[in-house]
């Protein structure tokens, strides 16, 4: 199963690290608790649209970029889940 919140967290963490920012810096800039951002990055909490907007603003990143990256990761994971196993391909060819 593809978990959107996990992929969103992965993208947010990667973008934060790419910018060389600490959780503390993002927390102060977004005015969101450090612990809550950490839980979002680890895919343990869902981010509301308002919170996501604040995080994107703190990272100086358009929301559309984050959503596009997450969308690409979702599509990749779906293709891996939906891809038939090699034994299935061989069985259907026989």
Image: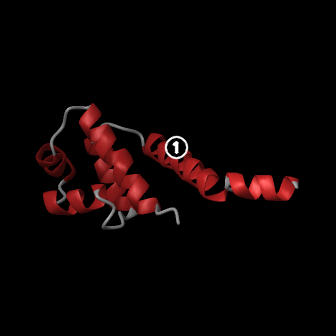
Residue 76: where, in percent of width, then height?
57, 47
Q: In the displayed structure, would residue 39 be above or below residue 65?
A: below
Residue 18: where, in percent of width, then height?
28, 32
Of residues 82 and 53, the one nearer the viewer is 82
For this orientation, the residue located farthest to the top is: 19
Of residues 48 and 18, the one nearer the viewer is 18
The quarter of the displayed image where residue 88 is located: bottom right
Q: Secondary structure at mark 1?
A: helix
Of residues 8 and 93, the one nearer the viewer is 93
The quarter of the displayed image where residue 32 is located: bottom left
The quarter of the displayed image where residue 61 is located: top left
Q: Residue at point 55% right, 44% down?
A: 72
Give the tally of numbered discs. Answer: 1
Residue tagged by mark 1?
Answer: 68
Q: Quadrant of the C terminus?
A: bottom right
Residue 82: where, in percent of width, then height?
66, 58
Q: In the displayed structure, would residue 38 be above or below residue 26?
A: below
The image's colour scheme reads: secondary structure
For this orientation, the residue located farthest to the right is: 94
Q: Is residue 9 left or right of residue 26?
A: right
């Amino acid at each position: 199963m593809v978990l959107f919140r996990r992929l969103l967290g992965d993208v947010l963490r990667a973008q934060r690290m790419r910018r060389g920012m600490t959780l503390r810096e993002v927390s102060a800039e977004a005015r969101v608790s450090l612990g809550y951002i950490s839980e979002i990055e680890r895919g343990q909490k869902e981010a509301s649209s308002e919170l996501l907007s604040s995080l994107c603003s703190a990272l100086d990143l358009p929301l559309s970029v984050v959503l596009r990256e997450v969308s690409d990761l979702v599509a990749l994971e779906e293709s891996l889940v939906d891809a038939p196993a090699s034994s299935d391909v061989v069985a259907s060819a026989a």
